[in-house]
């Protein structure tokens, strides 16, 4: 894919992997829209990325399909097209299944899984036009279960299955679909505050570089499911 002036839409873009990926794609010559639930926060993040002719921040809660439709309309008004979508918005609540609340469960399923569907549903017509690329941000928790992870595992196992099935549905339109499944990333996930102690972890920009590699790959080749993990977790 020739990336010059192509348009990427990244959900959950105010910090972490979404923001790191936005930086990488902007540096590659793309135009980028990032979204988040809080308008002031997402606009501040967008302003911090530089050239306001190539970056916008739009408000959207991916749990709300109308929000995603409105976000797409705003992106089209600003840039006229959508070529790449990264469904990155997500959260985690960790508790034993007998102690997890209904709200905690629903937050994860509605954001991590249903949100990815809302994002695809809102953008798929534009991706058909552009013969674009849809990418979900899953997790190694989407293939490896663990104690206190029932809700998070369920959401991320679901994202992996959803994305792989979507890949089969959409390839006839020349839309490429992949899911990225990272291990530990130095982000604000689960109220963590990144610091120098996170140097052993994957960095947000590393995921951005991986997205860029996918976009640059010869279109005859599709890495449909990518696991990525820290090289030296023993250094933590």
Image (cartoon, grey):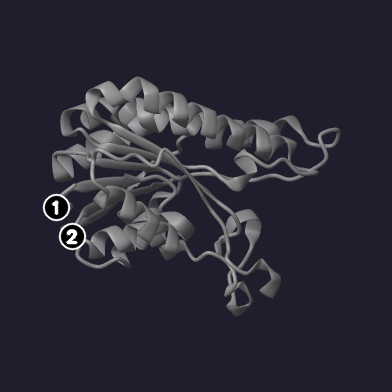
Residue 101 screen position, x and y as percent: 77, 34
Residue furthest bottom in the image:
196
- Name the one closer to the observer, 190 or 184: 184
Q: Which residue is the site of mark 2?
A: 29
Residue furthest front in the image:
220
In this picture, is 133 found above or below 8? above
- Name the one closer to the observer, 26 or 226: 226
Residue 108 screen position, x and y as percent: 62, 37
Whether pointer 1 and pointer 2 mark residues with C-beta atoms closer than 8 Å, the reply is yes
In this picture, is 137 found above or below 28? above
Residue located at (58% from left, 70% from top) = 194
What is the count of numbered marks?
A: 2
Can residue 236 be seen at all in this image of the molecule? no
Residue located at (18% from left, 52% from top) = 3
Quadrant in the rendering for residue 52: bottom left
Q: Which residue is the site of mark 1?
A: 5
Can residue 34 be seen at all in this image of the molecule? yes
Helix or strand or loop: what does disc 2 sit on? loop
Residue located at (61% from left, 39% from top) = 142
Please tell me which of labels 1 and 2 falls first in the chain. 1
Residue 134 screen position, x and y as percent: 34, 37
Q: Is residue 74 left or right of residue 151?
A: left
Quadrant in the rendering for residue 29: bottom left
Q: Residues within 10 Å of mark 1 (few under 14, many from 20)?
A: some
Quadrant in the rendering for residue 224: top left
Residue 236 screen position, x and y as percent: 69, 72
Q: Which mark is residue 28?
A: none
- Name the one closer to the observer, 222 or 6: 222
Q: Residues within 10 Å of mark 2 (few under 14, many from 20)?
A: some
Helix or strand or loop: what does disc 1 sit on? loop
Question: How far apart are the two marked residues, 1 and 2, measured between alpha carbons?
Answer: 6 Å
């Amino acid at each position: 894919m020739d990336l010059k002036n192509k348009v990427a839409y990244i959900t959950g873009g105010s910090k972490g992997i979404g923001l790191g990926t936005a930086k990488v794609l902007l540096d590659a010559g793309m135009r980028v829209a990032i979204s988040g639930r809080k308008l002031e926060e997402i606009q501040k993040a967008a302003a911090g990325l530089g050239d306001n002719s190539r970056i916008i921040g739009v408000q959207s809660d991916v749990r709300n399909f109308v929000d995603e439709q409105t976000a797409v309309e705003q992106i089209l008004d600003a840039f006229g097209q959508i070529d790449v979508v990264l469904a990155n918005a997500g959260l985690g609540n960790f508790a034993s299944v007998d102690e997890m609340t209904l709200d905690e469960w629903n937050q994860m399923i509605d954001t991590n899984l249903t949100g990815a569907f809302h994002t695809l549903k809102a953008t798929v017509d534009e991706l058909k036009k552009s013969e674009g690329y849809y990418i979900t941000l899953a997790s190694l928790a989407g293939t490896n279960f663990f104690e206190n992870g029932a809700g998070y595992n369920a959401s991320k196992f679901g994202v992996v299955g959803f994305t792989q099935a979507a890949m089969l549905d959409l390839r006839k339109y020349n839309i490429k679909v992949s899911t990225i499944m990272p291990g530990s990333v130095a982000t604000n996930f689960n109220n963590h505050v990144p610091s120098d102690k996170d140097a052993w972890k994957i960095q947000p920009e590393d995921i951005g570089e991986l997205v860029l590699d996918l976009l640059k790959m010869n279109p005859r080749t599709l890495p449909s499911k990518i696991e990525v993990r820290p090289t030296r977790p023993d250094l933590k």
